[in-house]
Amino acid sequence: MDTVLAIDLGGSSLRAALVARDGRIVASAERRHRVGEEADAEGWWGMLVEAVAELPRADVKAIIATGFTRTQVLVDGAGRAVRPAQCFADTRATAEAVELAGAARGTWVEMTAFHPAARLRWAKAHDPAAFARARHVLQPKDFLVLRLTGRVAADRISNAWALDRRGNVRALPLFRRAQLDAALLPELFDPWDVVGPCTGLPGFDGVPVMCGAMDTWCASLGAGAARPGDAYLIAGSTDAGGVLSDAPAEAEGLVTQPWGIGLYHTGGPSGGGGDCLQWLAEVLGQPHVSSVVALAERATVGTAPLLFLPALAGERAPSWAAATRGSFVGLDRAHGAAEMARAVMEGVAFADRDLLGGLPFDRLFLAGGGAQSDMWCQIRADVLGCQVLRTHGQPGLVGAALVAWAGLGVFASLPAAQAVVENVATEFRPDRTVISRYQRLFEVFKQVQTMAGTLAHGLSRF
């Protein structure tokens, strides 16, 4: 059977799978890991080699990788990482972002502490010896592609931060203002372009390796979002999502960028997600996140409202408040572990609503590990006030594989490839009896966000 080898480097695991033309996963293997402010990029390659070794032999036509973004891997001329990767939770470049205010004007991505240019300035100032050895800055999946092919490459979609809106070319003024060499960014490709033959993975010599793109882009395709008016959420360690349109649609604090398939995307990465439940599981001494979900199902909803701000590592889109930290507001003696668990799930759903920027959309596709709970899906439908379609399976792997099959010419386009996938979805419709309550709670949630930012500024002085 013909397959492609799809690789998905997520914030909590690396998955490798053999995927058939119809999007069916024939075989897969996984390695768990944990990403903090920094990570060992070389360790990702070791996990990939181990995972692929577990897969059965197959006729692999192409290899493609996807992975989390908002992460920078600096490599030297020989392709070795010169320092730990700066990962999506890293908020240390706050001062650099302030210094570079306005530098990203005219690009697709606003300047914040999470911006790659601010991160690179931080690395240059705090680790000058390593930075001096750096020749390229890569996303995590690009580092894997480098190991696979020996060639540095990156894709245009994941690197919209460095592109000028007027021509989608390198935004040289940004690099000059940040005192960075524009050559740090390698040659840019479309996700379906072949970077080169595989030379670094045993048993796959000569197999074409495609550039791939960031996990949210691939997962949105794998989840079913592909037309104007579609919205999606990928519920992972942190949630990510957006709204698709046929023309740029601006919303404050959100990233608007070309989506590579005749569409524009407005959205971004949230600071909240499944990791908030993982944190609560550890605090409560629960063995697994599913135990916390079971607790939440026993919560007494009629008690006094309890709000949770899911900013355990700062807020990303749309507020980009790196210094803000999480909180419970309204906690009283009537609340127990069950109510706290439900509040965390609701808080993430409020952050998801924030992430979609009030933009109009017809339907929302929901996928990822944080979408496995029926209760959490229903909470999201109630908070968002819309139809939610939960797609099953592993959308990141499936979406990446569809890109590869389209790149091989098996399908005429990505939408054509997407049409062959039998993505049976579970539908959740909003409960009209609770929508108004969640609307009022969301308004208070926004007030809590504002106050939390002010309080975080005060705490930062300790």
Image (cartoon, helix red, strand yellow):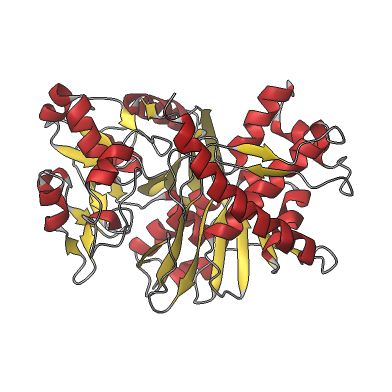
**49 vs 345, nearest the viewer:** 345
Seen in the picture, residue 388 relative to 246 is either above or below; the reply is above
Image spot of residue 311 (x, y percent): 55, 40
**441 vs 344, nearest the viewer:** 441
Image spot of residue 189 (x, y percent): 23, 57
Kindly indicate the quadrant of the structure image that contains residue 425.
Answer: bottom right
Residue 17 visible in this rendered orientation of the protein: yes
**325 vs 155, nearest the viewer:** 325
Seen in the picture, residue 446 relative to 276 is either above or below; the reply is below
Image position of 152 (left or right of 54)? left
Image spot of residue 35 (x, y percent): 46, 30
Image position of 452 (left or right of 330)? left
Kindly indicate the quadrant of the structure image that contains residue 150.
Answer: top left
For the image, the number of numbered tags is: 0
Image position of 131 (left or right of 404)? left
Question: From the image, which quarter does the C terminus lie in?
Answer: top left
Tell me the residue at 86%/41% (across/down).
299
Tell me the residue at 35%/24% (across/down).
40
Tell me the residue at 61%/48% (across/down).
448
Residue 391 visible in this rendered orientation of the protein: no
Image spot of residue 1 (x, y percent): 49, 50
Kindly indicate the quadrant of the structure image that contains residue 156.
Answer: bottom left
Seen in the picture, residue 369 relative to 391 is either above or below; the reply is above
**232 vs 65, nearest the viewer:** 232
Image position of 458 (left or right of 164)? right
Tell me the residue at 68%/38% (across/down).
328
Seen in the picture, residue 166 relative to 158 is either above or below; the reply is below
